[in-house]
Amino acid sequence: MATIHVISPHRDDGALSAGLAIQLLSEAGHRVVMVNCWTRSDFCPYAKRKGVNRVSALREAEDRQFAALVGGLTVMDLGRTDAPLRLHVSVNDVRLRGRLSSDDLAEVETLSATLGGIVTNVAIFPLALGDHIDHSLALEAALRCRASGWRLGFYEDLPYAAELQECCVEAAARRLSRRLGERLWAATAQAEGADRMKARLIGAYPSQISESQAAAIREYTRRRQGERLWLTSDTVSLLFPQHHGWAVCKAREVQPFEALRCALHRQSRSSRAAAGRVIRAMRAMGHIQQEASNV
């Protein structure tokens, strides 16, 4: 059996995105370790808790509750500072930031070196759907780790993935495949009542997701009939030699019209996000009136 490290940018990402897969892999006899990277945080939008220490403690408690629900899961915290605190920006400004800065790349190198002393067999990283900077840095670390010969997998970041069209999720996997220089396999963790199982697991994080986000995650899982991971071929052969409880297939080829449609989706999201950043900046500088809040 393998040791599988699930790389979670924050305390909740691994659970929200791959909780069902974590449970099934653990039940299959694999040793699963969830590695939380950026754990110093003051983000808890749905709990009345303030201050880095108090919020971080609350999020740690939620994470341990998830581990108890799964059973047999080891949790490891790296203690790094999350993007809003590290970059001195608002939560709204940690997505779609454009090119990585020199500080971002230094963070990638530090994370890669740290993980290099931890991971042994397999590491499952975020696909970085939603373009949150910390998720993107984790993905960059994964690319460096692949060059060192690691077996890799990637999960679809929730709740961000639920905001996207299916073609956009598949396009992200294809872009990653091109960067890796190899075709990925799609492996779906399947179970009867997968959406109900997922709802039970993500219920451990009431400070992090709203009822509507929890419903969107459950619906995303219901449509999938489980959770989908994107895996390198050597990960598939190690973890799923017989595919019990998993639907495994090569990532499909995209049709030209699908690529065009997806490009339009991405352009629309990028334009909306850019407009939102400009409006927030102008409002902060006092150059914009209240009526612009409807833009």
Image (spheres, grey):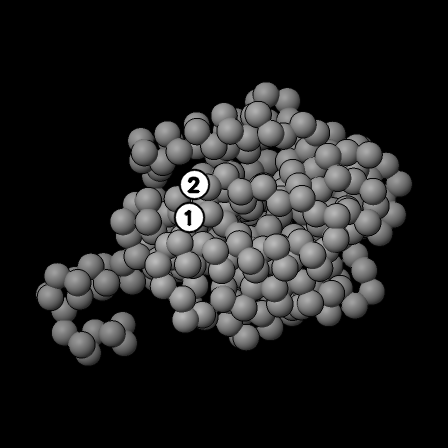
Q: Residues within 10 Å of mark 1 (few under 14, many from 20)?
A: many
Q: Quadrant of the C terminus?
A: bottom left
Circles 2 and 1: CB atoms closer than 8 Å? yes
Circle 1 — which element?
strand
Visible residue check, residue 231: no
Disc number placed over residue 16 in the picture, else none = none
Identify the residue shown where x is 60% and y is 29%: 118
Q: Nearer the viewer, residue 71 or 111?
A: 71
Residue under label 2: 80
**What is the C-alpha distance between the residues marked 2 and 1?**
6 Å
User: In terms of image quadrants, where is residue 285?
Assistant: bottom left
Disc 2 on helix, strand or loop? Answer: strand
Visible in this render: residue 282? yes
Residue 112 spot, x, y in % from top left? 50, 29
Q: Choose top left, top right, bottom left or bottom right for residue 75.
A: top right
In the displayed structure image, the side of residue 127 where residue 101 appears, left or right: left
**Residue type indicated by callout 2:** Arg
> Horizontal placement of 201 versus 286: left or right?
right
Residue corresponding to mark 1: 40
Across and down, in percent, residue 106 comes to 37, 29
Residue shown at the point (67%, 27%) measured from the top left: 120
Q: Tag 1: residue type?
A: Arg
